[in-house]
Image (cartoon, grey):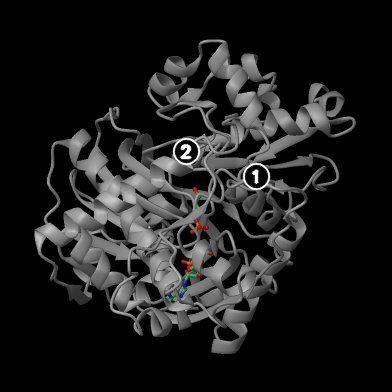
């Protein structure tokens, strides 16, 4: 049967999506399902790994069925995932021994403090490219080993496996035959040496993590295995591409050349710049990370990770109940011409790049008797743009490259008001591609390359822009607004620890 499609599995923080792409890189079908966010304590965030697997395999079958496409017509599956989120499961039963600890979870801040006190900060930065933060998987694995009954014994017997979500999905898709990850995901664990391209023994030792738990690290584009016959009605579909969602988006935006960059506005906001075969270390609070392993080599990226972006809009919807749906934010924000001095700093999970403060907490500043809900909504949207400006400044500083334009994608970029404010506050054009599902597209491309469905040239030729937002704000206003933002951020720092 002719192989006409690539199926991308995009396992995000709030939903599992399955998207079918044809040869031209167009979306043929999509199915999506949100799943439960579990908040057991303040600062803790968990997912049920079985629900992740259930929703992800469910939407994969659903998109094929609703489009009337047979699994045999799918040339390959590409996987992309929320990164850092940590799962530990029993090798023999395939059952998780604890919920997945999500990247946003702050429970291991104390373990990070201990690593710093031991003087490991510069070692970690130099060898993993990361800052010491609860964000990454390493300390989450240690927490599970220390806190889940029987975990250490199981691990010592070699019966416990660790994986990020890509690894967990591949394990389930192949029914326990394959335990692998790719370079891009490994580089988010704080356990992987990005220079020597191997698990870092010193860090495994420091955290007490046995090497037997770890997946094998492989390139981002190759056949890792085939799906078990039961998952897709008898078909054995090659699983042929894997990348963490932010690196996949960089690939989907065809940022193949050093110096090209993209910003993705999802739950969080992540700006990545391709730095080619050079691992550039940051002076300004960015991360050095692996973009992908492809064509027999590894390429690197600089990354600015913002923890709360679209999640702040969800907070307006679910927490404050100021809006009924995320797109409503544009409607209400559009009813006022600006925020009248109100700033929202959504440091709900501390602050990531470039501040890296696990103890910062959110705040609203500049309230007056005249403040209306519209101002708060607008200030929340503005906070996505200000955080992006913080990161872009750091990136230009570290790379020495001034961006000519910013390529964007992710769920929140449909918000035109936000995109216009982004262009205004940055002073550079913001480019929105025709396919904003670039994360899934990137994973599809990686899989398609491995099975000869596309060439890199065909991929580059597929890229189309849909809209460009030109900056339309004078320099004085821009500087004044940004100064207010910096002042607001300063007052949220170290909030949780400050004992005045
Ligand atoms: N029109 C909109 N305006 C602002 N934010 C939006 C809009 N539509 C979606 N979002 C936000 O985008 C996020 C969803 O984007 P998505 O890329 O699907 O995220 P993820 O992959 O992190 O689950 C949500 O946090 C939602 O609040
Ligand atoms: O699920 P997303 O799109 O919010 O992405 C989450 C990131 O991978 C976290 O590092």
Q: Is residue 120 shown above or below 458?
A: above
Q: Which residue is mark 2?
A: 493
- Residue 341 appears left or right of 154: left
Front position in the image: 75 or 156? 156
Instruction: For the residues labelled 2 and 1, say whether their Cβ atoms are less than 8 Å apart.
Output: no
Front position in the image: 161 or 414? 414
Please report the residue visible at 11 percent of the width from the left and 56 percent of the height from the top: 404
- Determine the secondary structure under disc 2: loop
Q: Position of residue 252 (x, y in %)?
A: 33, 61
- Residue 4 appears left or right of 275: right
Q: Position of residue 15 (x, y in %)?
A: 60, 67
For disc 2, does the CB lie below 8 Å from ligand 2?
Answer: no
Please report the residue visible at 33 percent of the width from the left and 63 percent of the height from the top: 341
Numbered mark located on residue 178 in the image: 1
Work out whether residue 60 can be spotted.
Answer: no
- Residue 62 appears left or right of 116: right
Residue at the farthest top position:
118
Q: Position of residue 418 (x, y in %)?
A: 32, 71
Residue mark closest to the camera, 2 vs 1? 2
- Residue 84 appears left or right of 107: left
Q: Is residue 60 shown above or below 196?
A: below
Mark 2 or mark 1: name the one nearer the start of the chain. Answer: 1
């Amino acid at each position: 049967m002719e192989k006409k499609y690539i199926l991308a599995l995009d396992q995000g923080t709030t939903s599992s999506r399955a998207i079918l792409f044809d040869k031209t890189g167009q979306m043929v079908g999509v199915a999506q399902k949100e799943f439960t966010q579990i908040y057991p304590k303040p600062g803790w965030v968990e997912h049920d790994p079985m629900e992740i697997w259930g929703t992800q395999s469910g939407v994969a079958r659903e998109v094929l069925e609703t489009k009337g496409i047979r699994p045999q017509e799918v040339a390959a599956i590409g996987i992309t995932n929320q990164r850092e989120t940590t799962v530990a499961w029993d090798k023999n039963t395939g059952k998780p021994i604890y919920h997945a600890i999500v990247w946003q979870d702050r429970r291991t801040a104390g373990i990070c403090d201990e690593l710093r006190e031991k003087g490991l900060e510069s070692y970690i930065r130099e060898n993993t490219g990361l800052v010491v933060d609860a964000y990454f998987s390493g300390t989450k694995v240690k927490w599970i080993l220390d806190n889940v009954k029987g975990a250490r014994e199981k691990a010592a017997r070699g019966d416990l496996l660790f994986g990020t979500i890509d690894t967990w999905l591949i394990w389930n898709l192949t029914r326990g035959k394959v335990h692998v990850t790719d370079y891009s995901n490994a580089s988010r664990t704080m356990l992987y040496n990005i220079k020597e391209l191997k698990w870092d023994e010193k860090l495994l030792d420091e955290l007490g993590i046995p090497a037997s738990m770890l997946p094998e690290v492989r390139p981002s584009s190759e056949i890792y295995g085939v799906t078990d016959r039961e998952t897709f009605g008898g078909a054995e579909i090659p699983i042929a591409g894997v990348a963490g969602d932010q690196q996949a988006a960089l690939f989907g935006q065809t940022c193949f050349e050093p110096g090209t960059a993209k910003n993705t506005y999802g739950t969080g906001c992540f700006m990545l710049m391709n730095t080619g075969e050079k691992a550039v270390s940051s002076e300004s609070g960015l991360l050095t990370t692996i973009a992908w392993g492809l064509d027999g080599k590894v390429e690197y990226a600089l990354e600015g990770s913002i923890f709360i972006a679209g999640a702040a809009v969800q907070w307006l919807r679910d927490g404050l109940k100021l809006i009924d749906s995320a797109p409503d934010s544009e409607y209400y924000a559009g009813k006022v011409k600006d925020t009248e001095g109100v700033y929202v700093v959504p440091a709900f999970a501390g602050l990531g790049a470039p501040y890296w403060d696990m103890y910062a907490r959110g705040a609203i500043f500049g309230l007056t008797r005249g403040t209306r809900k519209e101002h708060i909504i607008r200030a929340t949207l503005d906070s996505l743009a200000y955080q992006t400006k913080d990161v872009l400044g750091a990136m230009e500083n570290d790379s020495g490259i001034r961006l000519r334009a910013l390529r964007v994608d992710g769920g929140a970029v449909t918000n035109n008001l936000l995109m216009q404010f982004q262009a205004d506050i940055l002073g550079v054009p913001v480019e929105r591609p025709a396919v904003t599902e670039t994360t899934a597209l990137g994973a599809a491309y990686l899989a398609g390359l491995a099975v000869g469905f596309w060439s890199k040239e065909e991929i580059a030729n597929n890229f189309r822009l849909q809209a460009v937002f030109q900056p339309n704000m004078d320099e004085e206003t821009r500087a004044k607004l940004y100064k207010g933002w910096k002042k607001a951020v300063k007052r949220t720092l170290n909030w949780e620890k400050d004992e005045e």
